[in-house]
Amino acid sequence: MTTLQSVPAPGTRPTAGSRPERAETRERLSAATFDLLVIGGGILGISTAWHAAQSGLRVALVDAGDFAGATSSASSKLLHGGLRYLQTGAVRLVAENHFERRAVSRQVAPHLANPLTFYLPVYKGGPHGAAKLGAGVFAYSALSAFGDGVGHLLSPAKAQQDVPELRTEGLKAVAVYGDDQMNDARMALMTVRAAAEAGAVVLNHAEVTGLRFTRGRVSGAELRDRVDGAEFGVQARLVLNATGPWVDHLRRMENPDAAPSIRLSKGAHLVLKRTAPWRAALATPIDKYRITFALPWEDMLLLGTTDEEFEGDPGEVAVTEGDIDQILDEAAFSVRDNQLKRELMTYAFAGLRVLPGGPGDTSKAKRETVVTEGPGGMLSVAGGKWTTFRHIGRTVMNKLATLPGRPLGEDMEPQSQLPKRLPLPGIANPRAVTHRLLVDGPAPGPRMAADTAKHLATHYGSLALDIARLAEERPELAERVHPDAPEIWAQVAYARDHEWAETAEDVLRRRTTLTIRGLDTEDIRGKVENLLRR
């Protein structure tokens, strides 16, 4: 049998749909003057690049690390209306969030999002009563036009049938509502692909070392390729700073005296193996404003999140023992101890929420998006939430259209003239794709495993068929990366050739689920690195 290590390197990488080599991409970035240079490959920058390219602008997108390599792949993996915002009377905001949530999960990326039922347990002595929460989830579902059913109350016995590990001591009732769930890293990568297919030139692992100025105006950036150390520059009519937690760092490159514009809140999460099937998620009130989640996700259980002000280096954010204790202690309000043993933990991660600057408790702060212009003309965008990533892209584009002097306004299609729900690549019914993968499996030989077929369909949509063909052409790529995970080696080759993967971390943490499952062994990392170099 041919082993992965002994597969000869192909003479060339595929051309149709493949990313160019990095040197070619750097040459394209260096040779042109772009209308818009987006610095920052989190979802805000990615969405803006996608919308700008769709508007007809010549767009470049760069990031010092990987796409969605920081905050955008460290979320709670939810597309949601924001139930807690009803506490503050932000009814319009919840309705807008619901609109965006439904658009993404129904029309834009139904292959990457899935509906999730939430149980909100009401315990004796808890911060909210059953009547209040029952009314709250009804109003929440009404603001979603009852598209996910009618929010209602459920008996503890019925709820425990769907969540066997639900703690029932002191449980008076359970409020029920619906939202949606996703793999945030996969959603971000598909949006990068959409931007590239619309004409944007994109490059990850490209660090900005300085800004370019022309007659006092920011006119581009100097960059260093972190993969091979090459230095190059990008010229642009307008530069957008979408660097998330690092937004003030880049603002100080434009103006060393720039005052802080944001504050940061750390959110930590834990991933655990499940001890039983979960057919619903738990959203448990901790106090008047905070909720802790227990979410079935990627065949695992995702717990979190914390919410505390963070003042350190954004690059050093990490989960502490205190975070782990807090998450497990808060989960124990509604989850049985059997599911919360530390030996079940496979991964822990932390991200930073970007909030508008100002005083107050971070847990009560609104996730607003702020767009500002610096003295050199660089725009900075910060804040917002995953659910509204399309709206944020449109907001930035509307800002570009109304800048003084309209530097780009004459060259771009108005947002009102563009399709409202442009789909992401691979859009398809994931159940139909799963069926195709199982029925049209490679012959002769064993058909694709059911868990692999479902995984590919719900992470790539119709593009999963390309991965299946790759596995047919090279049988060694049809093998599992690890026996306890659904991923196959064809996904690693696909990530290299089509998804800008440069490092083992890119593949194992963001293009696959090996890291979050605790299966990124030293041996697997070595094999991934070998395949990436071919």
Image: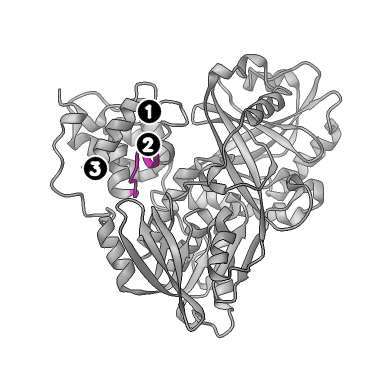
Amino acid of disc 1: Pro
Amino acid of disc 2: Leu
Name the residue carrying label 3. Answer: 533
Going by the picture, which residue comes out furthest to the top? 338
In which quadrant of the rendered image does the C terminus lie?
top left
Name the residue carrying label 2. Answer: 456
Q: Does residue 93 appear left or right of residue 20 in this picture?
A: right
Which circle marks residue 486 in the picture? 1
Tag 1 secondary structure: loop
How far, Cα to Cα, is label 1 from label 2?
9 Å
Q: Quadrant of residue 159?
A: top right
**Residue at left offset 61%, top offset 36%:** 268
Tag 2 secondary structure: helix
Mark 3 / mark 1, whichever is N-terminal: 1
Mark 1 / mark 2, whichever is N-terminal: 2
Please name whichever residue, 443 or 298, is drawn nearer the observer in this view of the structure.
Answer: 298
Category of crowding for the residue at label 3, using alpha-carbon neighbours closer than 10 angstroms: few (below 14), some (14–19), many (at least 20):
few
Q: Quadrant of residue 532?
A: top left
CB under 8 Å between discs 3 and 2? no
Q: Does residue 130 appear left or right of residue 447 in this picture?
A: right
Residue 280 picture location, percent across and down: 62, 28
Q: Quadrant of residue 180?
A: top right
Magenta-colored stretch includes residue 506: yes
Residue 370 picture location, percent across and down: 65, 63
Tag 3 secondary structure: loop
Category of crowding for the residue at label 2, using alpha-carbon neighbours closer than 10 angstroms: few (below 14), some (14–19), many (at least 20):
many
Mark 3 / mark 2, whichever is N-terminal: 2
| Whether residue 78 is visible | no
Mark nearest the camera among 3 and 2 is: 3
How far, Cα to Cα, is label 3 from label 2?
24 Å
Q: Does residue 138 appear left or right of residue 464 in this picture?
A: right
Category of crowding for the residue at label 1, using alpha-carbon neighbours closer than 10 angstroms: few (below 14), some (14–19), many (at least 20):
many
